[in-house]
Amino acid sequence: MEQFKVLFVCIHNSARSQMAEAFLNKLGEGSFLAGSAGLEPGKLNQNVVTVLKEIGIDISRHGTQSVFDVFRQGKRYDAVITVCDAAKAEQCPIFPGKVKRLAWSFADPSLLNGTKEEILANTRNVRDEIEQEVLKFIAEAKQLSYWI
């Protein structure tokens, strides 16, 4: 069975796209192959690493990468999903080519304020929202059997 290839894209590839990639690779049960990239790759968000570890997903060794580098490598995807928040959607990069394009809006964990516990609690909320969106994506893809 050929895997359905998905690229998740955001500004820094440090939080939202990393979480979406991890969830699709875990929950997609081998039917999907997810990657992630950003417009301006940053440093992996350690709060995201923490809240994913809480649910048994370890991304601590993941690096960040540029969407431009991914494009130059000639990688092909069946779908490209941007995960920027609605307020910054115009900055979210577009990946060229004939692919299904989707846009999901999530708060940026790197912009959260408050105490360490408040930031972690809000990062958990973003994590849970992304997980639910990935589960919906998987269910829809299975209904459209030509995807997988």
Image (cartoon, helix red, strand yellow):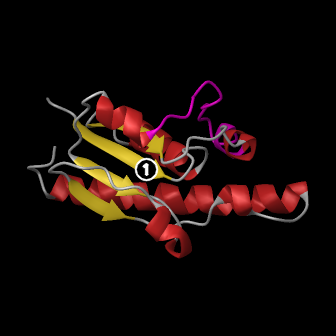
Magenta stretch contains residue 65? yes
- Measured as percent of width and height from the top left, residue 92 is found at 45, 60
Could you say which quadrant of the image residue 27 lies in? top left
- Measured as percent of width and height from the top left, residue 42 is found at 63, 41
Q: Is residue 104 left or right of residue 51?
A: left
Residue at 44%, 37% in the rendered image: 26
Magenta stretch contains residue 91? no
Task: Kindly give the residue lying farthest to the top in the view shown.
Answer: 61
- Measured as percent of width and height from the top left, residue 40 is found at 55, 45
Q: Is residue 52 left or right of residue 13?
A: right
Q: Which residues are magenta?
A: 51-66
Comparing 145 with 79, the one in front is 79
Callout 1 secondary element: strand
Could you say which quadrant of the image residue 25 lies in? top left
The vertical placement of 81 against 107, above or below, is above
Q: Is residue 9 visible?
A: yes
Comparing 62 with 56, the one in front is 62
The vertical placement of 13 against 103, above or below, is above
Quarter of the N terminus within the rendering: top left
Looking at the magenta stretch, what is its main secondary structure? loop
Residue at 57%, 28% in the rendered image: 62
For mark 1, what is the residue?
9
Residue at 54%, 66% in the rendered image: 106
- Measured as percent of width and height from the top left, residue 41 is found at 56, 41
